[in-house]
Image: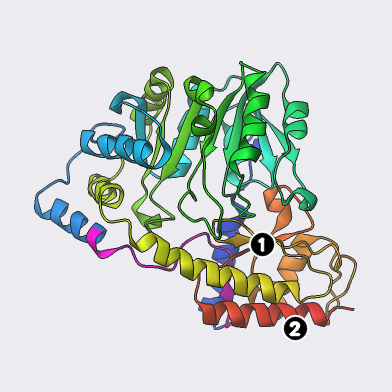
Amino acid sequence: MTFLSATLSRVKPSPTIAVTTKAAELKAAGRDVIGLGAGEPDFDTPQNIKDAAVAAIAAGKTKYTAVDGIPELKAAICAKLKRDNGLDYAPNQVSVGTGGKQILYNALMATLNPGDEVVIPAPYWVSYPDMVLLAGGEPVIAAASLETNFKLTPEQLEAAITPKTKWLIFNSPSNPTGAGYSREELKALTDVLMRHPHVWVMTDDMYEHLAYDDFEFCTPAEVEPALYERTLTCNGVSKAYAMTGWRIGYAAGPVEVIAAMRKIQSQSTSNPCSVSQWAAIEALNGPQNFLPANNEVFKRRRDLVVSMLSDIDGVTCPVPEGAFYVYPSISGLIGKTTPNGTVIENDEAFATALLEEADVAVVFGAAFGLSPNFRVSYATSDEALKTACTRIQKFCASLT
């Protein structure tokens, strides 16, 4: 009899963390590996945010705080949601956690019963299905396709909903594809949800501010106000503010759900880091003028990567609307063989061979629920991206 919980047999470790770890190990062994696996901006946290953290330390704001966020941060979150999204929330409708992942996890733990279903559009962030499984629910995968630019259609959503459905997890712009839903596309999905009043929507708006060209971000409760009472709007400071290591995420929603999430957090991690909370206040309330400048850099990198990968025979690389990922299809490479004799049977074999034979780390598409693809994070320098994409081009050209 095993000592470990049977629940663990329902889940797997994060593939993105595994890829990043493997790349780091090879680098430490002296290999010139370029890692394109981590979803982390290479920009430094803005100075005013770091200064706010230093000031908090100097002022002795280093004690325990309220379990799910200090009042000042909750007020800043309410102001942000009103300013950016036109959504009215009170502080008792807000929960702050140790990163966006904990917010999502708390919500699922607080609401799912055995047998409850959660609709998850694919490609999806790797952690969604496993968090549902850990919470005792059943993920229902609704697979989008390259033909719809990896966006879920209303017909697919309708087909995925059953009497057991409790949540739809919605992510736009998307990790891993960068696909963003227009207001019209999102309204078509919320129209489906309006026909199914037992289904709630959990939004992951983490890439809200990373939008390019003429794409305009919108969130479900903003598009369909009638969904307000069954929407949990989730976000954080990690990506847009280059604060991944500060670990602050937040959610706003109905009081009863927020209270249940608070109960979960009170018996698990308790409060997020006090200093990080004060830094997050400055992020949300402080100057936002660096965001367009950062986005111009990301857009340039996106265009570089899309251009270079699109030049490869057998690879199709859509242009994403946001985030900092591309999700190329390698359907034209399946079945080919590397110079070392490895057969590209699937996208995991492709990613493994690319790392071992070309020193480029990417994440294989099966980890995100849709194959044959791979994810590239372009949140790194132009030079590294050019070198990596050149290696990918040469690797693909060597396949026979």
The color scheme shown is: rainbow
Residue at 66%, 77% in the rendered image: 389
| Left or right of 191 on screen, residue 393 | right
Residue nearest the viewer, comparing 3 with 213: 213
Magenta stretch, residue numbers = 31-48
User: Which mark is drawn over residue 336?
Assistant: none
Residue identified by numbered label 1: 319
Q: Earlier in the sequence, mark 1 or mark 2?
A: 1
Residue nearest the viewer, comparing 289 with 107: 289
Residue 87 lies in quadrant: top left
Q: Counting other residues with Cα less than 10 Å from the Cα at mark 1, is it few (<14), some (14-19), or many (20 or more)?
A: many
Residue identified by numbered label 2: 394
| Left or right of 52 on screen, residue 365 | right
Q: Is residue 135 magenta?
A: no
Is any atom of residue 245 visible in this view?
yes
Q: CB under 8 Å between callouts 1 and 2?
A: no
Q: Main secondary structure of the magenta part?
A: loop
Q: Is residue 40 magenta?
A: yes
Residue at 35%, 36% in the rendered image: 82
Residue 36 drawn at (x, y percent): 58, 68
From what the image shows, is residue 211 above or below residue 273? below
| Left or right of 144 on screen, residue 131 | left
Residue nearest the viewer, comparing 125 with 324: 324
Residue 299 drawn at (x, y percent): 54, 67
Is any atom of residue 65 visible in this view?
no
> Which quadrant does the N terminus fall into?
top right
Q: Secondary structure at mark 2?
A: helix
User: Which amino acid type is marked by label 1?
Assistant: Val
Residue at 57%, 37% in the rendered image: 131
